[in-house]
Image (cartoon, rainbow, N blue to C red):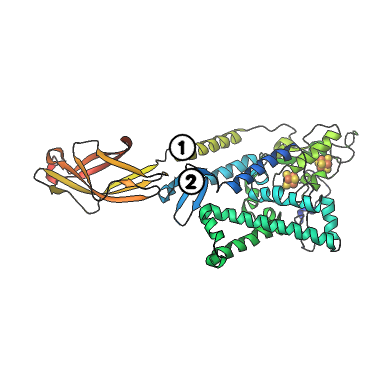
Amino acid sequence: MENPGNYQETSFRDRPTTFSKEGKRVWLYPKMPQGKLYNIRRVIAWTLLAFFYAAPFLKLKGEPLIFLNFLERKFVLFGNTFYPQDFHLLVLAVIALVVFIVLFTVIYGRIFCGWACPQTIFMEFLYRPIEYLIDGNADKQKRLAQQDMDAVKALKRILKHSIYLVISFITILTFVAYVTGTERLGHIISGWPLQNFGMLSGVLAFTGAHYFVFAWFREQVCIVVCPYGRLQGVMLDVNTIQVAYDYKRGEPRGKGGDGKHGDCINCRKCVAVCPTGIDIRNGTQLECINCTACIDACNSVMHVMNRPLGLIRFASEKSISEGREIRFNARAIAYSAVLVALLSVIVYLFTIRGSVETTIIRAQGTLFQEYGPDSFSNLYNLEIVNKTNSSVKVELKLLSSGGEILVMGDSLKVDKGEVAQRNLLIVLKKTEVHSSNNKLEIGVYQSGKLIDKIPTTFVGPNSLDKP
Ligand code: SF4
Ligand code: SF4
């Protein structure tokens, strides 16, 4: 990796800034960012948090907004119910998502990490603000950490960690609500704890893990654990747009605007706000989550210095080294087109998904049978999946010939979310059976409306085949 910004200082290459020479953890006290980008991030983060905590409780078409019922293999997304029969959609969506993430990262860098990743959202917009509220700003936090334990410090620690634990507990219960549904969760909570001992143990274990991550482990998730973060090295290149320091404009550092120095006054405000503790002036680093806090910090300095904003900005390494604005090259345009195409495919697949899925296949190992003096019959297996939120009644009619469909068993009424399986006979007059393999089309009707056409075949005697 180049070190375009700081020509003297290279110790950042030796180890992550959060590890000391002895290999011990260096605790970070990032300053609270302020600025336009932070304000936008805050709105996005609070919207995402509100959605996360509310989604299992909100209902659409009588179903929760999101319900991931793994036990019954039933998944509800925004009022649409998905069953194992829709598994192919899920596989396609996951493949498309992986390709999407890779291509998006190649062009636009790690924006997801700083703007939408749950780790950043929880840390920077829920847990960190509570810390600012109780322990004070970054300087006060540092002083508090270094001072001996006294009544005030103890009180602050107990208050902060109690709030963290409560938030962690509520967060894990929300996750559980996504899987069990809010009604079942209500029963579990109101029941005797020992009746749900397994569930309670799981909730407490995950609460502990969640608390550990946000109270202590923090930025280490992004720096040493997250696989997406580790993959940046192979996904980014000189054309990738990311948070970057304009070393051409900023160096040599010193008193900006005196003719001898660049615009960087070495105030280190960009470093002070960084939640992963790095100095972006050392160039692109694996630890950078593209949160843009350093952009806001540096812009406030440039504003005071009466210099153009954007000494740190979204830019590609190439655009900075060539001293020009970001240009979308052919590759970026082609990748963006693929991204749009992928999204369109996913949306299309989900919109064409039928709410009632009917499958009719001829029963294995059966041929035709005489049915009365003048007809033949074939036996079929019928399966109807009702993916709607109410019961449906379907009718079957032959569209391609004048025969008859005889369904064995109950009427074709299928309750919501249920799968009905029946056998059926198709009976054709001998005069309508022209060969050993006759093509048929069956119409599926719901409330008198044709909702699907299913092609199948009807087997007749070989002797009918023309030589
Ligand atoms: S270098 Fe800037 S964008 Fe990157 S993590 Fe630090 S503050 Fe955020
Ligand atoms: S905030 Fe801007 S001016 Fe200050 S050290 Fe960082 S890059 Fe230089």
Is residue 202 toward the left or the right of residue 300 in the image? left
Q: Position of residue 30 (x, y in %)?
A: 78, 50
Q: Position of residue 283 (x, y in %)?
A: 75, 45
The label number, if any, that marks residue 63 in the structure image = 2
Q: Position of residue 419 (x, y in %)?
A: 36, 50
Circle 1 SS class: helix
Q: Ligand 1 is in which quadrant of the figure?
A: top right
Residue extending furthest left? 373
Is residue 51 toward the left or the right of residue 410 in the image? right
Q: Quadrant of the C terminus?
A: top left
Residue neighbourhood size for the residue with mark 1, other residues' Cα within 10 Å, grouped as few (<14), some (14–19), many (≥20): few
- Please say whether residue 100 is visible from this viewpoint: yes
Q: Position of residue 378 (x, y in %)?
A: 20, 47
- Which residue in the protein does label 1 denote? 348
- Please say whether residue 26 is visible from this viewpoint: no
Q: Tell me what residue is drawn at x 55 percent, y 48 percent.
A: 57
Instruction: Tell me which numbered mark, 2 or 1, is placed earlier along the sequence.
Output: 2
Q: Amino acid at mark 1?
A: Tyr
Q: Is mark 1 within 8 Å of ligand 1?
A: no
Q: Quadrant of residue 6?
A: top right
Q: Tell me what residue is drawn at x 8 percent, y 45 percent.
A: 373
Q: Quadrant of residue 260?
A: top right
Q: Tell me what residue is drawn at x 85 percent, y 63 percent.
A: 150
